[in-house]
Amino acid sequence: MNIKKIFKNNEDWISERIEKDKNFFKDLSKGQNPEVLYIGCSDSRVSTEEMMGAEPGEVFIHRNIANMVPNTDLSAMSVINYAVCHLKVKHIVVCGHYYCGGVKSAMQSKDLGILNPWLRNIRDVYRLYRHELDLIEDEEERYKRLVELNVIEQCMNVVKTADVQQAFRERQIKVHGWVFDIHSGRLIDLKVDFNKMLKDIMKIYHLS
Ligand code: CO
């Protein structure tokens, strides 16, 4: 992608937006009030707002390799805290995607240096579900299932935070697990049973 072209695109975008609504940027600068926190993968093929049909200001976004929510990751934990306690979002979405390079790397025996500790979180998901995963003979299907299970586990990590537990009690915040199918463009709702998850989680992880 040509860097100069990016600035030209930016000018075109400003013109388009102002043509439709002359106060567009003025209004945006007043503040944000998003109802959704989206936690997704950094993959360049996943265009968060575009696939959701979301406008600027509607979705608070956190992205990293393989849409992880490690309990000790200051970045992910800060984003959740800010979105839940300050922006008061109503929904938290963890969105994975099929053909995720991060998930694929975690399925291979390869030393990837600094990426090892990050990807180890995905290997842990594999270990948790190895009985189910090992029954899937087709490698691509196994890989797709790991993408889904990883989303479910990251939803659990979201639920393990005190902020989310408190927000659930006070205002019934909801957590959703989705997968974006790059092959079809479709967004799939894994229909995570949030209430059941919360009940299970609370036995051990009750904080607030
Ligand atoms: Co990915």
Image: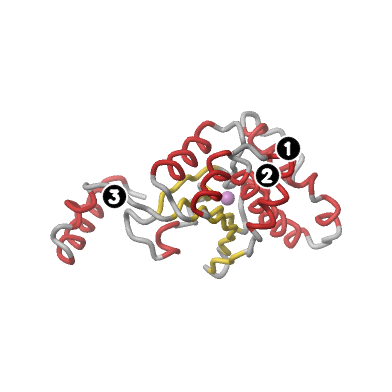
> Residues under labels 2 and 1: Cα distance?
8 Å
**Label placed on residue 202:** none
Q: Looking at the image, which is closer to me, 179 or 185?
A: 179
Residue 141 location, x and y as percent?
Answer: 74, 62
What amino acid is at disc 1? Lys
Residue 91 location, x and y as percent?
Answer: 49, 55
Disc 1, SS: loop
Q: Looking at the image, which is closer to me, 61 or 173?
A: 173
Distance from mark 2 CB to nearest ligand 1 atom below 8 Å: no
What residue is disc 2 on?
Answer: 105
Q: Are marks 2 and 1 in contact (CB under 8 Å)?
A: yes
Q: Looking at the image, which is closer to me, 32 or 147?
A: 32
Give above or below for 59 relative to 83. Answer: below
Quarter of the image for residue 105 reads top right
Distance from mark 1 CB to nearest ligand 1 atom below 8 Å: no
Of the image marks 3 and 1, the number of the one nearer the N terminus: 3
What residue is disc 3 on?
Answer: 6
